[in-house]
Amino acid sequence: DVKVTQSSRYLVKRTGEKVFLECVQDMDHENMFWYRQDPGLGLRLIYFSYDVKMKEKGDIPEGYSVSREKKERFSLILESASTNQTSMYLCASRPGEHYNEQFFGPGTRLTVL
Amino acid sequence: QKEVEQDPGPLSVPEGAIVSLNCTYSNSAFQYFMWYRQYSRKGPELLMYTYSSGNKEDGRFTAQVDKSSKYISLFIRDSQPSDSATYLCAMSHQAGTALIFGKGTTLSVSS
């Protein structure tokens, strides 16, 4: 089974803090994704990565950056957290560019005070 | 018009009922269709994956795609309380491209 893990289930941070969300997959998948999920807005793609050191902006990249130094790990960085970044953050992985199915982690519920 | 429309519900049914969950879409190029199930405070898990038109069955679950009507459905037979979750449809037009998600339908099955 594909396993995607996220570093924290729940996180509380203060406005202006730098926040790191970590995601690790154990199936040697090439592609990885970061989404946020908000009531009434559904899943929105923040960033994705086709391979190590590669990244592409999704639909809502503002206020976020990412890092992929190793194939299994994809980090989402909130440079200066704001209250409107309070959300559920979901990481997903996909075997490669010839596939469609994405496999999700359990999510990190981030609250910014 | 949004690319993918999904009634948010909530949908409440008694145990044993047949449930029908639906999505409509506007992009006729979509060919790959998925259904995800998401329990409260958890990540989505892939439930069904179909390519192009037709039906696919897996146990109590049947996924149906009608490309001529741009309409996909997920049927759940003999629904159980453990089926209570939010169901998300997702689709793409080409392998390897971004998935477009519906906003999800919340289902509650009461015993």
Image (cartoon, coloured by chain):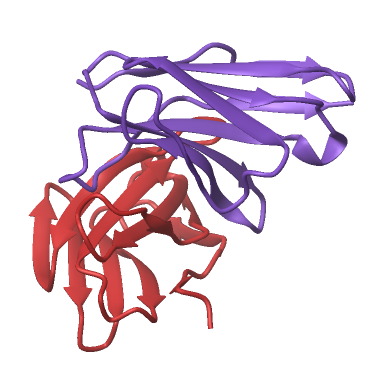
Chain colours: A purple, B red
- How far from the left and from the top, in percent, is residue A20? 64, 16
Name which residue lies at 24% across and 43% down: A101
Name which residue lies at 81% across and 41% down: A84
Q: In which quarter of the image is residue B40?
A: top right
- How far from the left and from the top, in percent, is residue A88? 63, 34
Q: In this view, does A10 lie above or below B50?
A: above
Q: Is residue A44 above or below residue B55?
A: above
Q: In which quarter of the image is residue A63?
A: top right
- How far from the left and from the top, in percent, is residue A43? 53, 49
Quadrant, the N terminus of chain A: top left
Which residue, as the protein is rendered here, is positioned at the far bottom? B68
Of B88 and A85, which appears nearest the observer?
A: A85
Residue B59 appears in view:
yes
Quadrant, the C terminus of chain A: top right
- How far from the left and from the top, in percent, is residue B6? 47, 69
Q: Is residue A110 above or below residue A17?
A: below
Residue B79 appears in view:
no
Instruction: State the count of labels.
Output: 0
